[in-house]
Image (cartoon, rainbow, N blue to C red):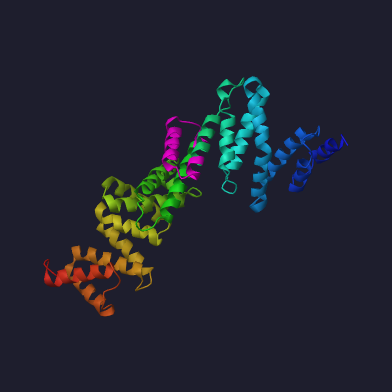
């Protein structure tokens, strides 16, 4: 009867949120007098499930939440310019819709844009826009741009957030979003893809993330920051190898030094530090790093041949006779010198020692 819907809402009002309870609420007819309160309670339950649950139940709750919340948002948006209560509800619900719609497990870009559109007239609302709201909207626009692979627009929005000194939380989240996106692009790139802009973004935005801390050391010691520093160093090393930029090389060299203080046998960190050290005027540090790499690498593996060739190259500058002896020993063990390019490199070094600079 007429009261059945109201009884359903009242019974579920204090119930623990569940998809079953939501189903009961959403089965009411739009003609039922309790329809509005049922929709509100369903939205509350679905958002609670989205924030509290995990896996498929979470994503299902998120998707259903958008279905229920968007019409409620549209209603309040119509009234917001002349109704302070509706304006407050509109902004609060727009934030929730954006949060859910742009979650990686939901990702409904049309719903996100509808939420942005719902608060487009907020300048005319009869109440003050809450602090941080504008920054949050900018961050959400950045997320939409990234989801559409519009990285140039996303980076522009990120830079605007930085320049306007908006709320720190959203600026930090923006830096992390651009950083993660660029890391993914680099990792997925093929051998002929141009990744220079991705590497620049990793260096710059990752550098900003590290710069949130008092020092490089305190950054690396913070949860999750070791991986950020390692990726900033890895991208910086690639950029330095392409450009030879001394200032960049020094920054990356310092990061690798701090990383090695904490993980002295990490092969990636040792390799980066070793490659940069000669250009930093520290051949001894390069030799030390290559020795540790060799000690921790299977003889005859490709990383072993790389380390061996660099070690002999350094030795050639210090003690050519010793380098010749090491190369002779290497040739006995590996008559074909080893895989390219390291084997060819050692063969050329040997021929230079044996026959001089004019070696064929």
Asked if 355 appears above or below 229 in the picture, the reply is below
Magenta part mainly helix, strand or loop?
Answer: helix
Asked if 353 appears above or below 16 in the picture, the reply is below
**In which image quadrant can residue 98 be found?**
top right
Asked if 75 appears above or below 152 in the picture, the reply is above
Residue pictured at 51% horizontal, 37% vertical: 141
Pick whichever, 263 or 346, lies toward us. 346
Asked whether the viewer can see residue 132, the reply is no
x and y, in percent, of residue 196 in the image: 34, 49
In reply to whether residue 158 is colored magenta, the answer given is yes
Asked if 250 appears above or below 322 in the picture, the reply is above
Query: What segment is highlighted magenta in the picture?
Result: 144-170
In reply to whether residue 23 is colored magenta, the answer given is no
Residue pictured at 43% horizontal, 33% vertical: 160
**In the rendered image, which quarter contains the N terminus?**
top right
**In which image quadrant can residue 130 be found?**
top right
Pick whichever, 12 or 294, lies toward us. 12
Number of on-image labels: 0
x and y, in percent, of residue 342 in the image: 28, 68
Residue pictured at 42% horizontal, 58% vertical: 263
Asked whether the viewer can see residue 74, the reply is yes
Q: In this view, does 21 lie to the left or right of 344?
A: right
**In the rendered image, which quarter contains the C terminus?**
bottom left
Q: Is residue 223 left or right of residue 275?
A: right
x and y, in percent, of residue 162 in the image: 44, 34
Residue pictured at 27% horizontal, 47% vertical: 245
Q: In this view, does 55 lie to the left or right of 21?
A: left
């Amino acid at each position: 009867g007429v009261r059945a819907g109201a009884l359903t809402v009242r019974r579920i009002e204090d119930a623990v949120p569940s998809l079953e309870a939501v189903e009961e609420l959403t089965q009411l007819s739009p003609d039922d007098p309790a329809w509005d309160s049922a929709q509100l309670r369903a939205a509350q339950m679905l958002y609670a499930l989205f924030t509290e649950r995990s896996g498929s139940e979470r994503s299902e709750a998120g998707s259903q939440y958008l279905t229920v919340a968007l019409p409620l948002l549209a209603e309040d948006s119509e009234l917001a310019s002349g109704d302070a209560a509706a304006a407050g509800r509109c902004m609060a619900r727009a934030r929730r819709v954006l949060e859910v719609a742009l979650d990686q497990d939901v990702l409904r870009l049309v719903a996100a844009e509808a939420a942005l559109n719902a608060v487009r007239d907020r300048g005319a609302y009869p109440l003050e826009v809450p602090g941080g709201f504008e920054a949050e909207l900018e961050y959400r626009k950045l997320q939409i741009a990234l989801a559409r692979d519009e990285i140039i627009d996303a980076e522009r929005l990120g830079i605007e957030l930085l320049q306007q000194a908006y709320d720190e939380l959203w600026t930090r989240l923006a830096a992390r979003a651009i950083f993660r996106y660029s890391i993914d692009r680099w990792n997925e790139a093929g051998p002929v893809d141009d990744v220079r802009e991705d590497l620049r973004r990793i260096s710059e935005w990752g550098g900003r993330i590290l710069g949130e801390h008092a020092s490089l050391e305190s950054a690396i010691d913070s949860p999750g920051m070791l991986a950020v520093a390692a990726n900033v160093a890895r991208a910086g090393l690639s950029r330095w190898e392409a450009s030879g930029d001394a200032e960049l090389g020094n920054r990356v060299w310092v990061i690798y030094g701090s990383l090695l203080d904490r993980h002295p046998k990490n092969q990636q960190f040792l390799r980066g530090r070793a490659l940069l050290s000669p250009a930093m005027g520290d051949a001894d540090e390069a030799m030390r790093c290559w020795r540790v790499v060799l000690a921790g690498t299977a003889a005859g593996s490709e990383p072993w041949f790389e380390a061996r060739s660099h070690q002999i190259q350094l030795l050639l500058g210090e003690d050519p006779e010793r380098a010749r002896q090491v190369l002779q020993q290497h040739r006995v063990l590996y008559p074909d010198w080893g895989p390219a390019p390291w084997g060819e490199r050692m063969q050329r070094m040997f021929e230079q020692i044996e026959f001089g600079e004019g070696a064929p």
